[in-house]
């Protein structure tokens, strides 16, 4: 082999070594960039989850169908982002158990919300619908019947029932239901009570107790009934989302360290090999 060919070989070897280093650097950067994208997706999921919570509060405040639809829309956006995260983790051969658990938790939350929404639809999303509307009609019929009798004592009795009803609506305390029952029994116990008035009062009581039962299922306070169940589901979603964010931060930190050391080791090995081959070629040149 001539000196010229040996020099060409040494140059080719140097170029090949440089290309290998560049390829290793690019692969390392790509892996770290993918992990950074996964971290960004977890941040996006956290923001989407906050929007879901905001829509839930809007629905609880206004009981509007539009707010329920907005919550479903935000939940769909959350699910889309989560599927992107799961696909990315699988592509990088990273564990997806926590992400799949988060997906299950969000599904359970949405199922709970739909049950919650259905119960509120039964109760009535406005004063004219559901049990609210039925109760309103019943009490108006009872008032008209009582007024038609011209008896002030009966009118005072039904006004007391309405006061107990409104106290329950405002304070969500069962003691006002007990007061309602006591005053109702006292009212219908009058021996001179008209049969028609008694029947309308019975329908009023029946509708009121049906509303109380439905309100109890929903929850008379934030830590009871479907409200508590919904909060528990959301808490499970939040906990799982925080777990994923923490795990990915750890994975990214460890991957950066491993990638840095791996790249440094690779560069050192390539440099050593090039140096060794250069030294061997230089010795053969000296001999010739």
Image (cartoon, grey):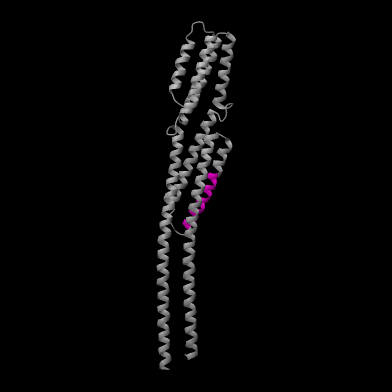
Q: Which residue reaches farthest bottom?
A: 288
Q: Quadrant of the C terminus?
A: bottom left
- Taking 214 as reference, is 261 left or right? left
Examine the rendered structure and indicate whether residue 225 appears above or below residue 281. above
Image coordinates of residue 19 in percent, x first then y, are 49, 75
Rendering quarter of residue 247: bottom left
Residue 106 percent coordinates (x, y): 48, 44
**The one of 13 and 244 positioned closer to us in this rendering:** 244
Q: Image quarter for residue 150?
A: top right
| Residue 64 pos. (x, y %) | 57, 35
* Image vertical order of residue 242 relative to residue 170, above or below: below
Residue 128, position in %: x, y? 59, 26
Residue at 40% x, 75% y is 269
Viewer-proximal residue, 246 or 24? 246
Give the side of residue 260 with respect to residue 211, left or right: left
Q: Is residue 208 above or below residue 243?
A: above
Magenta stretch in the rendered image: 74-90
Look at 50% across and 16% down and name the residue there.
Answer: 160
Q: Given the current orientation, which residue lies at the most extreme top position?
A: 192
Q: Which residue is drawn at 57% across and 24% down?
A: 133
Q: Main secondary structure of the magenta part?
A: helix
Q: Please tell me whether residue 82 belongs to the stretch shown in magenta.
A: yes
Magenta span includes 79: yes
Give the mark count: 0
């Amino acid at each position: 082999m001539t000196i010229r060919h040996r020099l060409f070989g040494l140059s080719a070897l140097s170029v090949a070594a440089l290309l290998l280093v560049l390829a290793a650097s690019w692969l390392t950067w790509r892996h770290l960039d993918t992990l950074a994208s996964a971290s960004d997706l977890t941040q996006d999921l956290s923001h989407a989850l906050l929007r879901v919570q905001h829509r839930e509060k809007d629905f609880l405040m206004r009981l509007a169908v539009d707010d329920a639809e907005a919550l479903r829309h935000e939940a769909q956006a959350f699910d889309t982002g989560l599927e992107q995260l799961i696909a990315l983790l699988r592509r990088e051969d990273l564990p997806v158990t926590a992400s799949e658990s988060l997906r299950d938790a969000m599904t359970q939350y949405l199922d709970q919300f739909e049950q919650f929404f259905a119960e509120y639809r039964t109760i009535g999303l406005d004063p004219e619908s559901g049990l609210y509307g039925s109760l309103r009609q019943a009490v108006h019929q009872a008032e008209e019947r009582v007024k038609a009798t011209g008896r002030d004592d009966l009118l005072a009795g039904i006004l007391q029932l309405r006061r107990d009803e409104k106290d329950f609506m405002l304070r969500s305390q069962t003691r006002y239901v007990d007061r309602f029952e006591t005053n109702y029994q006292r009212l219908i116990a009058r021996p001179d009570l008209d049969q028609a008035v008694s029947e309308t009062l019975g329908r009023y009581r029946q509708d009121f107790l049906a509303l109380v039962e439905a309100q109890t299922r929903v929850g008379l306070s934030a830590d009871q009934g479907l409200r508590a169940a919904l909060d528990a589901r959301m808490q499970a979603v939040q906990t799982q989302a925080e777990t994923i964010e923490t795990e990915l931060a750890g994975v990214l930190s460890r991957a950066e360290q491993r990638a840095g050391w791996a790249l440094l080791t690779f560069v050192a090995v390539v440099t050593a090999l090039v140096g060794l081959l250069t030294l061997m070629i230089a010795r053969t040149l000296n001999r010739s």
